[in-house]
Image (tube, grey):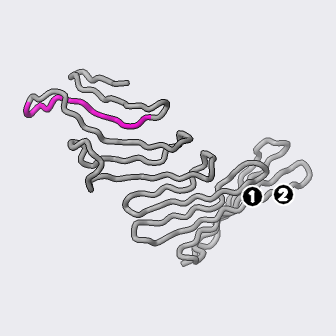
């Protein structure tokens, strides 16, 4: 597939099966009048299950290579054989870890672990519960945020539904700890 602009330049999308693998820009260098110059800015990688495993951004796209130091990469891992993302890691050292819990047959995020490039980490635990009072159902999600194992913030959200219909949402934010 390609998209052509009015000046004849175009963007070419390369695919392997159903997966996009790279995006290339072809243009005429106006300074030298050299046609068909190519920039490859983004490369994509996949695993055997066609899940995205990497995105590589070439910060010096004129060389059309990813073996140099001028690239930025995002890497993805998954929760077992599911399509649930378990981690996103960036080449600067920052990362996001994602854990899940099965709540009544539905997987929901239960923990987010954010690590910044300096190595500092922040953990957010999400706890789910449910209370039924007569025809009213209360789905409760609590979020507890920790910085270096110290509780910093607590938020509780309660969703009230009656006969399966959303009625009210209550949010309690408590205590920003330092």
Measured Cα–Cα span from mark 1 to mark 2: 8 Å
Q: Residue furthest left?
A: 32
Vertical relation: 149 (above or below) 160: below
Name the quadrant of the N terminus: top left
Q: Which mark is residue 140?
A: 1
Q: Residue at x 42, y 31 (%)?
A: 15
Q: Residue at x 27, y 56 (%)?
A: 69
Name the quadrant of the C terminus: bottom right
Vertical relation: 28 (above or below) 123: above
Q: How many marks?
A: 2
Is 137 placed left or right of 48 in the picture?
right
The crowding category of the residue bearing disc 2, from other C-alpha atoms within 10 Å (few below 14, some 14 to 19, many at least 20), is few
Is 131 placed left or right of 45 in the picture?
right
Vertical relation: 129 (above or below) 11: below
- For the record, the magenta segment spans 20-32
* Mark 1 residue element: strand
Q: Write down the residue under mark 2.
A: 131
The picture quadrant where one finds residue 130 is bottom right
Q: Residue furthest right?
A: 134
The picture quadrant where one finds residue 140 is bottom right
Q: Magenta: predominant secondary structure element?
A: strand
Q: Residue at x 9, y 28 (%)?
A: 33
Q: Nearer the viewer, residue 169 or 109?
A: 109
Q: Are marks 1 and 2 in contact (CB under 8 Å)?
A: yes
> Along the polypeptide, which appears first: circle 1 or circle 2?
2
Q: Nearer the viewer, residue 80 or 125?
A: 80
* Mark 2 residue element: strand
Spot occupied by residue 59 in the image (x, y as percentages of width and height)? 27, 49
Spot occupied by residue 142 in the image (x, y as percentages of width and height)? 69, 63
Q: Nearer the viewer, residue 91 or 135?
A: 91
């Amino acid at each position: 597939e390609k998209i052509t602009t009015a000046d004849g330049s175009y963007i070419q999308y390369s695919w392997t099966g159903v997966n996009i693998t790279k995006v290339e820009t072809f243009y005429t260098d106006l300074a030298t009048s050299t046609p068909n110059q190519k920039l490859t800015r983004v490369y994509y990688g996949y695993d055997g299950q066609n899940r995205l495993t990497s995105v590589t951004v070439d910060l010096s796209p004129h060389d059309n290579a990813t073996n140099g130091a001028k690239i930025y990469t995002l890497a993805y891992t998954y929760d077992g054989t599911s399509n649930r993302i378990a981690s996103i890691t960036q080449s600067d050292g920052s990362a996001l870890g994602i854990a899940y819990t099965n709540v009544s047959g539905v997987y929901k995020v239960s923990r987010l672990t954010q690590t910044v490039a300096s190595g500092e980490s922040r953990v957010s635990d999400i706890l789910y519960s449910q209370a039924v009072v007569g025809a009213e159902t209360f789905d409760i999600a609590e979020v507890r945020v920790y910085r270096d194992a110290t509780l910093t913030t607590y938020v509780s959200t309660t969703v009230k539904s009656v006969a399966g219909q959303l009625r009210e949402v209550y949010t309690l934010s408590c205590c920003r700890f330092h």
